[in-house]
Amino acid sequence: MARVLVYGTRACPYCRMAERLLEKKGVQVEKIMVDENPVQREEMVRLSGRTSVPQIFIGEKHVGGYTDMVALDREGQLDALLSHDVRRDAR
């Protein structure tokens, strides 16, 4: 299973929806709350080029926000990204 990292805030409804979708798919989400740490918000912007939350990374791939992830799911691409075995890449 690929590592999933979500930059978000406590007050963001789209962050919660993203987490719920990923949890329904059996994914353990690593969360970074940028409202608690401005340095992490700066890191999110540097990595994603975006200031809005959530910003979602699957493995090393930035997939965007919640609506971007839902679009990938509708296109049938999200499950393939999530099932990518990151341990295989380390060989």
Image (cartoon, helix red, strand yellow):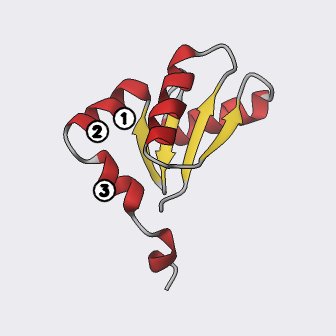
Tell me residue 18's x, y (percent).
48, 30
**Disc 3 and disc 1: Cα gap in Å?**
12 Å
Which one is in front in this view, the residue at disc 2 or the one at disc 1?
2
Label 1 neighbour load within 10 Å: few <14, some 14-19, many 20+:
many
Q: Is residue 10 left or right of residue 12?
A: right
Q: Quadrant of residue 10?
A: top right
Give SS at disc 3.
helix
Instruction: Relative to 67, say whether 80 is above or below.
Output: below
The residue at which mark 3 appears reads as: 80
Residue at 25% across, 48% down: 77
**Disc 2 and disc 1: Cα gap in Å?**
6 Å
Q: Amino acid at mark 1?
A: Met
Q: Is residue 10 visible?
A: yes
Tell me residue 9's x, y (percent).
67, 22
Which comes before the other along the chain, label 3 or label 2?
Answer: 2
Q: Quadrant of residue 80?
A: bottom left
Tell me residue 82's x, y (percent).
40, 54
Label 2 neighbour load within 10 Å: few <14, some 14-19, many 20+:
some
Label 3 neighbour load within 10 Å: few <14, some 14-19, many 20+:
few
Label placed on residue 69: 1
Q: Is residue 87 left or right of residue 80?
A: right
Q: Are marks 2 and 1 in contact (CB under 8 Å)?
A: yes
**Disc 3 and disc 2: Cα gap in Å?**
10 Å
The residue at which mark 2 appears reads as: 73
